[in-house]
Amino acid sequence: MTTDIGGVSFAFNAGDGDLDLAGMLPELPGLDRIRGARIGDLFQAPDRLAGADRLGVGVSLGELDQVGTDLGHQDLGHQDLGRLGLGRLGVGTDEPGIDEPGIDELGTDEPDIDELGLHPGVDGREPPDKPGLATDPPIFVDPNRRLPFVWRDPIIIDRSLLGEDSPDPWTWVPTPPRNSVQRGDLDVPVAPSASPTDGDLFESPDGDTRYALPRYSLAFETTGDPRISIVERDGTAILVMAFAETPSPAAAPGVAKLPHLVTVSLKYRVPVITGGTVVLDLPFPSVRIDGTTVVAEMPLTTPGLRQQLLAALSSLEAGVSLVVGRAVTVGVPTGETMEDGRPGYRKERLLLEWTAPPAPLVISEAHRNRLGGVAGGIQPMGRTRITFDGRSHSYWQDPARPERFYFLPDRFLLARLPGTGRPPALKARATSAASVDDVRVTLEFYAQPVLVRERLEAARPVLQEEAKARGVDAPVRLEVLPDPQPSLRLALPRGGAPSTGLVERPEAEIDLELGVTHAETLALEDFRLVYDALFGASLSLLRGEVRVGVGGAPEDVPLELRFDRTAGDVLTLTVTAASAAHIEARLTNAIESRVRPGNPAALAVCAGRQIPLRIEGLADDLVLSPGEGLDVRLVPRTPLPETGAQGVVLDQSEVVVDPDRDAIWALVFDRTAQPQLVREVSVEAVPALFAGPQGAGPQGDRVAAFVVTVERGGTVRLTEDVLTGVTTVRVPVGPLLTGAPPPPLRYRTETWWQSGGIGVSDWRETEATILLPVRTAPSPSPQGGGGR
């Protein structure tokens, strides 16, 4: 899987689930202030995160030129598949010879990458290109897994420093912007929408060729048993499953097969010893295509894993399902319009998943026995509680793989979105209303999970002893707890008063690795209180937590929604020049509010090593306004190697943000609907305005009527017999949401005189809701008279 950070993507071996944070960034002087690591991914918009894989839609895996582990600047091809620890992948295409296994067996170590804790494999074979169309399948680590952990957050990675593949390692080449392109400029098939499904019909850029993505179902023997076997290979038992190609709903004569990679994972439900269940996801590290058959293999590294899976496969309660992923590289519409009026497109790597029938999968007792299974149920997961920094944390142990433990993130923070300005991942949408009491505001947000590395590192020795007690000496591996049925609980004000307790929000979309997406509709008074709390006004008015109820007492992960404490980079670092002795760069405030950089720690990534950098040019009291930048020099503790640096990591955990209310409101308030409030306005006149001394108008003339027109409202006609009238006016709702005074009313008066003349006043502004007509002398007609 890949994650895009500050313009570069890193691939982590999510397949083995090893959260080797210490290996990624070993203890280095100057980095002791790095406190947290974000879970998740910044290249996906929140509306595509939660539940995307469950709905069967495409999950974006990053831009085409932003994926890899070598941190270099060049694009990646099939030769990089091995580095990503994919095991063996199947390559699907209609080209002759490509339906053979297309990726070599993986497993060779690459020390320069392994030192980063990425655990790579070896290079694979590259299938031949189809003339005029790129058939490269996407490059990423084990697409069956959800998004991995990022090293630290906030951090900046700058890909513009080239590594050993560059002929001149000290030549800086800027990363080109990722803009939309014309459909005709694409060299990959085109999807019909930004979120395609595996049942869609794809086309070549010129529209001459159509493509469909095949599905794969579990194959069966003539005896009726599924093609599931266990073979011995070099002393290790291997679980082997075979799948048969199934036509796509879009398949038809003349429709070609869309080039793709195939991945397979097995999901099953495991009981927890204290109650409840958890769904575990086991990816098959080796998948190959043989004609129209896909063969997936999984090493059963421990006897416990073999018996656990066989017990699950023979149990209806385990709910075993096989998820087949097809990874494709396609062009998708961006929603942008090009200069010629045509829609814009961009390349994306997508993973389209499908649960292969039958689901649930249950094998017969005789089949289980032939595979070496014994009678007995599924072994439950155990839980260990470890205290860190005054708070107790739970770790759940996999009974079949005792060295594997699952945990929860430390908290969730309001996210910042990628792209220009990195705006907060929050939107406020109001509806039009007939009165202030009827105004309703929908507040939608996306929060990212965060973990504290020190907490996990402190737990490792304890967990290692737990694994040894189960007879396993392998290093402890840590993963986020999968499928724990989490729920969001919020305490929001009602009627202007704080809530007395947390209330569950069942409609929230939650993924412990991706984040939380939720929309809440509030009355105007309550919204104002909540919005003030986002600036740190009161923690009692806006509290939340993600509750995970996995057996026994539930676990609660705090949710913090504040603009001064968000998940995501607020600074950008642009390298302008580099040498072995120093790196020249420009540090820029990328957000809408002022920031205080402080004294951040930094390091250079050089051929698998991390070299601490001293930042020169930053004053302790420096304040950067939005868009303001500063030239800095990064000086390595030891000279950088001749091969150059492949990336720069900047710790932003100590950056202080001073939220700008006006600028943030301009970003988060949705003006597309142009909500308006209908206000009632009264117009009143007194009898004296119709009679008496005529300060305005001909002597002896009288006013017959006043006609008052209200801007963005109606018209009222007053006479001596009708001295009052009522109309309505439409005013923007936006100012009311933040407590700003409503805009003044603008009106003018036509004075109709009995002599036939009409006087028209100037437009007047007032904040009052009772308007008085303005008597105005009639305007002279072109002949010197007035008339109606």
Image (cartoon, rainbow, N blue to C red):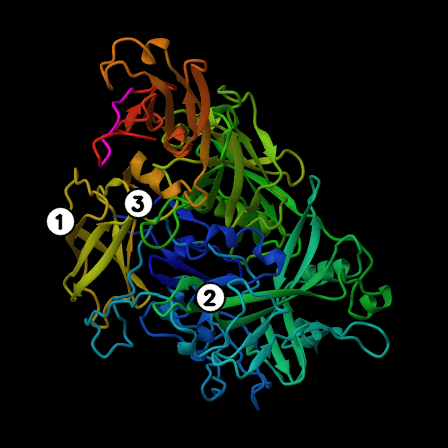
Q: Quadrant of residue 358?
A: bottom right
94 or 397, which lies in front?
Answer: 94
Circle 1: residue type:
Gly
Mark found first going from the N terminus, 3 or 1: 3
Q: Secondary structure at mark 1?
A: loop
Q: Which residue is mark 1?
A: 617
**Vertical arrangement, residue 752 with respect to residue 210, above or below:** above
In the displayed structure image, the side of residue 360 where residue 224 appears, left or right: right
In the displayed structure image, the side of residue 74 where residue 273 appears, left or right: right
The magenta span reads: 775-782
Q: Which residue is mark 3?
A: 32
Q: Is residue 772 visible?
A: no
Inspect the magenta stretch and tell me whether residue 720 lies in it.
Answer: no
Q: CA distance from mark 1 to mark 2?
A: 43 Å
342 or 138, which lies in front?
Answer: 342
Circle 2: residue type:
Pro
Where residue 275 appears, x then y in whole percent?
71, 40
Dot 1 and dot 2 residues touching (CB under 8 Å):
no
Q: Quadrant of residue 413?
A: top left
Q: Which residue is mark 2?
A: 333
